[in-house]
Structures are given as structure tokens and as C-alpha cells.
């Protein structure tokens, strides 16, 4: 609550009489939520039950009553801590019923609640009319989009100027040239204005929030962005003409400063578009690494005998679940690959002491201390909020007072002590949840999470350097893979691949089922077959959807909606096969562009276009990580999950470059 004022009245029979009964005393509040600012007025005697709050409806010239069916009341309340999108679902989880705006006395429900209560989001505010009564107090009338007017609010016991000052922190208000008593929400004047002043559509507040914190908006309101922000963005010109792709690129560049993704054919990209990568090879996957295979690759002191070999096995098939608790510690870098069992036990002892010293730091902070430490207070508040909605359908985290939730909370709070500069950013709980689920141990989960965050740190930094870099790199790879598809995306204002933001931010955590994420992450952690394999996974998903997107002529909104709706529908084994095939295409390319070579970490030796060999002029072979394709004499499983028992193919046969 950023503003609160008692003694704010509605005159229910204004103009009819001066009877005291016609005055309804109430409290006016301005509430700052996760992604919007809400103005809320309700009578002093109203209970906290929200089942009959009045909301301003755009489809009505009156006040409409917020009503819910009994089922909705149970499952779709305004505050649903178990929902990922509770804050963003307020409008879409309720049904509306028109209620005539009567000027008679305030009526009450059977439970005694007033029907005069209302709330609205500042994104719906069009203007505010200010006036003075003869008795000396001021009153305000809020006019919303589509000219919906709310009852006048009379400030009997306070100055309305404080409210205006509060609102000006969230929206820009200008005096109307036609009536000095009217304040208008600032409108767009020219396309060349800065990002902050560019928008005056219902999306204004959300765009402001996107600029301030794209993580929250992207994670929580991804689907609503489709028809809410960009319809407004592309149609706010009086002519309703679609804005050019270059301006859409400017929009994202202003949102994430430093993000440069080409929207035009430039010389550097013409070379890429002419390169033929050839046909994608067929790729199969094997069964998960078994406990027996793992044990065979360990000596008597507990050292891993052949690290590269075991990584190749994991890349090709993942791990059986019983191995994950041990193997993930190696994959994430918590355990050194060359360590003995005794050395690892000593390491765990030291790390346990270190962990609990850090945990004690925040545990021992008194309430008085925390009142004077706003950052710690904010971290705790955000962690508590996110923990209550992270993977709550998973048995490890479901139910109230679940010990898994307590551990999730404590590890994230301790991480704030470990890295106080970064602290906690929304999305980090998504990265920790599978790790804790596998480790089933607070200390081990913490240190594995620390190692994972070392990889992901730049994604969550304020400048978003990691996200900028990855979006640019993904654009480069996709252009090489399919320049025609890139051109189509650009023609639909989608060339900057904004819809991949969530994929990259939390490594597909919300795109695949929980069990599939365990498989996907352990494969990525092998760092095979090249650097930035997760970008090739993005390419694989996009290429799989290319035909539908282009054949059905999807526009900007449809592309965004379609990609969002892929969540939980992607076949992880198929995508892993396809991404590996793409990596082989690129690593076998004789003229791989330098930018792509650097992204994938491939030492590329250029060859002449007419050369029939994989050698350059000096006779040196094209260098690529061929160790992945060395023979592993184990049966494989095709992408459809069927076992090829007839041939008992070796990975050399199924994977070797042409």
C-alpha cells in the first residue's frame, strides 16, 4: 500500500438531498502489485471478502459487479499462492455481470457488504477530473478507457493533492488544454519519443514493468503479452498501420539496452545465407547410464577412470535416477572429477560447516535489524512468495508446511548471504527446485545450486548481459540454419526472438515436464558436443515449429501465442536428437562462419568452396570435437524410444559424421 486515506466519501444521492445517510465513508488506497498499480476504494465497514468487489468494465458504461460461481470462489480466488500466475490472473479468473449504476442509497448484500466498492488498474485510467465543493473539500472523478466514469470521491478530511502526487509516480499526468480541472494520462506524441513516453495504450503500465523487470513480466504474463501489449504497440497510430520491423527492434533494444539483432540483410549475413549445411544426419539415443556402468568406470579409491567416456554416455542417454544424486555433483562441479571418495567426504564436511555459518547469518538477524535492512527484507519477501508457488504439484513440494518448501526457502535465503550483491531474483527458485529434489539434502543442494548459478549468473544480473548475448547468438545460429525462416520471423516483427526469453532465462524449466527437465539438464551439463548446446536446443524447437508457423502465415501475436503454448508438449528425446543433428551439421560445415565457430567453441579451418575434402589448403583437417563420436559399444534407442535390438548399433555407426 503506497497511499491510504480515510474520510473519502461517495455521495450516493448527490443533488437530491443533504441527508447524512447519503454519504458513504470509505478508505481509498493505492496498491502497488507485482506488475500493476491498483486504486481501491471501499466503505469503512466492508469486510475483506472480495466476492462482490466492483470493477470498471471496458464493455460497459456503468459499474459492473465482480461475481464468481461457487466453484470459482473455491479455485480461483484473487490470491492463489499456489498459482504461478496468481498476480496476473485477476481479470481472467472471474466472470463479470453488469450492474446498473444507481444513484440511490447504497445497497448491501445479504452479508452486509456495500455494493459501492470499486477498484481499477492505472493501466485503464484515461483522466482525472478535479473540483472543489462549496464546503471547502475537493473531489475527484476517475474516467477510465472507453469513457467509463466512476462515482465521485469526496475528500472531506484530507487534500486530494497527495493522491495526485502518488499517482504521478506511476503515470504521467498532463493538464487538459480544454479544461484545467482535467488531468489526462499522457498520450503518445511522436514515434521518435523515448521508450518511457512512447505508449499510451492499456499496455502502458505493463510495458513500464517490462522495462523495469522483464523477468517477472515474461515469466508470469507471457501469454497475455500476446494480445495485450503488442496489439496496442502495433496499432496505436491513428492510421492503424503496422509499424516497421526496425521500430519493433528499437522497442526491444530500448527495453534491453545493448541488444542488437539485425533486422535487415547486411553483408555479414549474406555469406551465411549462401551456406548449404547439407541434410541433417539421423541421430539416435541410448538408454540411461546404469549404476553398473557408473561403478565400472571408477577405481578402488573412487576416482572416475575416464571422464570423457562417462560424459559421452550421459550426453547420449542421461542417467538413471538412482545415479543422479552422486553424478550431478560431478556434472555441476561440486565434486572434482579426479577426486577420491575420501577427498569428497572431507570436502562435504568443510562445505557443511561453511553452509551453516552462512545460514546462521540470516537466521540470527533480529526483527529490529531487519527493519533497517531493506534489501534483506525484500529478498525474504520475494523468496517466500516464490517458494509458495514453485512446483507445488510435485509431491516433493505439495501441501502446506512441506519440509521441501522449508528447505527451498532456507537455501535461497542462504544464497543471499553467499552472493548478497545478486541476492534473489525471480526465476532462481525454478533452478533450485530440481536440484533439491534430486539431492534430498540441504547442504549438497546448496553447493550444487551455487555451481549452477555460476553458469547462470549473468542471466539474473541487472544489466542482463547474459540474456543479451544469448539472444544475439541464437539469432546468428538460426540465420545460418534457416535464413528463410529468419526472414519470415523478421517480416512478422519477430526477428529478435523475444519469445525465447523464458527458455534461456531458466533453461527450459517451464517448457518441459519435471522429469524431462532432469534429463535435459544433465545432458546439457556434460558440455557436449559443443559450447552453448542449449542454443541449438532452441534452434531445434523453432525448426520443428517452422512449417506450421509459415504454412499458416502466423503473424506476431500468433507466433508468440503458439510458442507459449508449446509448454509441456515438447518431446525431450526428439529435441535432443534434433539439436545433436544440428550440431553435427554445423561442425561438418566446411565454411562455418567465424561468428558461429566462436559461439559453438569450434576451431574452424576454412576450406575452398570447391574442395571435396575436409582439409584446408595446408592439409590440416577441419577440427571438431570428434571424441563424442568414438565407439561406445552399447545398444541405442531411437528418438521414438524403440530399441534397435537387431543391429545392436554402436554409436560410431549411428553418429559418425558423413
Image: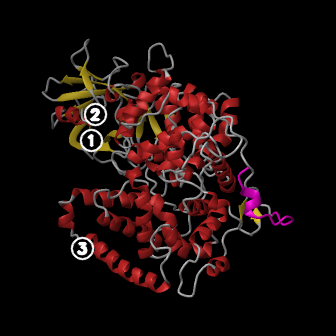
Left or right of residue 464: residue 511 = right
Residue at disc 2, secondary structure: strand
Image side of residue 309 versus residue 135, left or right: right
Counting residues from the start of the chain, the first of labels 2 and 1 encountered is 2
Vertical order, 52 against 194 (above or below): below
In the rendering, which numbered label is found on residue 327? none
The residue lying toward the viewer, choosing from 437 and 127, is 437
Q: Nearer the viewer, residue 601 or 60?
A: 601
Residue beneath label 3, please?
364
Crowding at dot 1, Cα within 10 Å, few <14 / some 14-19 / many 20+, comes out as many
Q: Residue 19 is drawn in which quadrant?
A: top left
Magenta range = 644-658
What is the count of numbered marks? 3
Q: Which mark is residue 26?
A: 1
Does any portion of residue 401 appear in the rendered image?
Answer: no
- Residue 502 lies, in percent from the top left, at 50, 47
Q: Residues within 10 Å of mark 3 (few under 14, many from 20)?
A: few
**Marks 2/1: CA distance?**
8 Å
Q: Looking at the image, is mark 3 or mark 1 earlier in the sequence? A: 1
Q: Separation of disc 3 and disc 1 at Cα?
A: 41 Å
Q: Position of residue 163 (x, y in %)?
A: 22, 35
- Which residue is depicted at the point 44% across and 17% down? 237
Q: Circle 2 sits on which residue?
A: 10
Q: Residue furthest front?
A: 618
Q: Tell me, yes or no, whether the two marked residues, 2 and 1, touch with CB atoms within 8 Å.
A: yes
Q: Nearer the viewer, mark 3 or mark 1?
A: 3
Mark sitting earlier along the chain (3/2): 2
Amino acid at each position: 500500500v503506497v497511499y491510504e486515506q480515510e474520510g473519502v466519501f461517495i455521495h450516493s444521492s448527490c443533488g437530491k438531498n443533504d441527508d447524512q445517510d447519503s454519504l458513504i465513508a470509505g478508505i481509498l488506497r493505492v496498491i502497488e502489485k507485482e506488475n500493476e498499480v491498483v486504486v481501491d476504494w471501499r466503505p469503512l465497514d466492508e469486510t475483506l471478502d472480495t466476492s462482490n468487489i466492483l470493477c470498471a468494465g471496458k464493455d460497459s458504461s456503468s459499474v459492473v459487479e465482480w461475481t464468481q460461481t461457487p466453484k470459482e470462489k473455491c479455485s480461483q480466488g484473487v490470491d492463489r499462492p499456489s498459482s504461478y500466475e496468481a498476480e496476473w490472473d485477476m481479470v481472467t479468473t472471474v466472470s463479470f455481470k453488469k450492474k446498473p449504476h444507481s444513484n440511490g442509497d447504497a445497497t448491501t448484500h445479504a452479508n452486509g457488504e456495500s455494493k459501492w466498492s470499486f477498484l481499477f488498474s492505472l493501466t485503464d485510467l484515461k483522466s482525472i477530473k478535479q473540483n472543489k465543493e462549496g464546503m471547502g473539500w475537493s473531489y475527484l472523478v476517475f474516467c477510465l478507457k472507453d469513457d467509463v466514469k466512476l462515482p465521485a470521491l469526496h475528500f472531506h478530511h484530507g487534500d486530494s493533492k497527495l493522491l495526485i502526487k502518488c499517482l504521478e509516480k506511476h503515470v504521467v499526468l498532463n493538464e487538459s488544454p480544454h479544461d484545467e480541472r482535467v488531468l489526462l494520462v499522457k498520450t503518445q506524441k511522436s514515434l521518435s519519443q523515448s521508450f518511457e513516453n512512447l505508449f499510451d495504450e492499456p499496455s502502458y503500465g505493463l510495458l513500464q514493468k517490462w522495462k523495469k523487470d522483464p523477468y517477472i513480466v515474461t515469466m508470469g504474463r507471457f501469454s497475455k503479452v500476446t494480445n495485450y501489449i503488442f496489439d496496442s504497440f502495433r496499432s496505436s497510430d491513428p492510421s492503424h498501420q503496422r509499424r516497421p520491423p526496425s521500430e519493433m527492434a528499437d522497442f526491444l533494444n530500448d527495453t534491453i539496452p545493448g541488444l542488437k539483432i539485425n533486422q535487415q540483410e547486411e553483408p555479414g549475413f549474406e555469406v551465411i545465407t549462401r551456406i548449404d549445411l547439407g541434410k541433417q544426419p539421423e541421430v539416435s539415443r541410448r538408454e540411461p547410464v546404469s549404476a553398473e556402468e557408473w561403478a565400472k568406470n571408477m577405481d578402488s579409491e573412487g576416482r572416475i577412470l575416464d571422464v570423457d567416456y562417462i560424459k559421452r554416455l550421459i550426453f547420449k542417454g542421461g542417467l538413471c535416477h538412482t545415479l543422479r544424486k552422486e553424478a550431478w555433483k560431478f556434472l555441476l562441479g561440486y565434486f572434482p572429477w579426479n577426486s577420491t571418495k575420501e577427498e569428497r567426504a572431507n570436502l562435504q564436511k568443510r562445505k557443511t560447516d561453511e553452509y551453516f555459518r552462512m545460514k546462521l547469518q540470516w537466521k540470527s538477524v533480529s526483527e529490529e535489524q531487519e527493519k533497517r535492512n531493506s534489501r534483506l527484507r525484500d529478498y525474504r519477501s520475494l523468496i517466500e512468495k516464490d517458494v509458495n508457488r514453485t512446483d507445488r504439484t510435485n509431491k516433493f513440494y505439495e501441501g502446506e508446511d512441506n519440509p521441501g518448501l522449508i528447505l527451498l526457502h532456507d537455501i535461497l535465503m542462504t544464497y543471499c548471504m553467499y552472493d548478497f550483491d545478486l541476492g534473489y531474483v525471480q526465476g532462481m527458485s525454478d533452478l533450485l527446485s530440481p536440484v533439491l529434489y534430486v539431492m534430498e539434502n540441504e547442504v549438497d543442494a546448496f553447493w550444487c545450486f551455487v555451481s549452477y548459478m555460476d553458469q547462470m549468473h549473468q542471466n539474473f544480473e541487472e544489466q542482463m548481459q547474459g540474456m543479451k548475448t544469448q539472444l544475439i547468438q541464437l539469432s546468428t545460429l538460426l540465420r545460418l540454419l534457416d535464413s528463410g525462416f529468419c526472414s519470415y520471423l523478421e517480416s512478422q516483427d519477430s526477428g529478435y526472438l523475444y519469445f525465447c526469453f523464458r527458455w534461456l532465462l531458466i533453461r527450459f524449466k517451464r517448457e518441459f515436464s519435471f522429469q524431462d527437465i532432469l534429463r535435459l539438464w544433465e545432458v546439457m551439463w556434460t558440455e557436449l558436443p559443443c559450447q552453448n548446446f542449449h542454443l541449438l536446443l532452441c534452434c531445434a524447437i523453432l525448426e520443428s515449429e517452422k512449417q506450421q508457423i509459415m504454412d499458416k502465415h502466423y503473424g506476431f501475436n500468433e507466433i508468440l501465442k503458439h510458442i507459449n503454448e508449446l509448454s509441456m508438449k515438447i518431446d525431450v528425446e526428439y529435441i535432443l536428437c534434433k539439436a545433436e543433428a544440428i550440431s553435427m551439421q554445423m561442425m561438418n560445415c566446411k565454411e562455418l562462419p567465424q561468428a558461429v565457430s566462436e559461439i559453438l567453441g569450434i576451431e574452424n579451418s576454412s576450406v575452398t568452396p570447391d574442395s571435396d575434402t575436409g582439409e584446408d589448403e595446408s592439409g590440416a583437417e577441419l577440427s571438431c570435437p570428434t571424441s563424442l563420436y568414438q565407439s561406445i559399444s552399447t545398444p541405442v534407442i531411437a528418438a521414438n524410444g524403440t530399441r534397435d535390438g537387431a543391429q545392436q548399433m554402436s554409436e560410431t555407426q549411428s553418429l559418425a559424421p558423413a
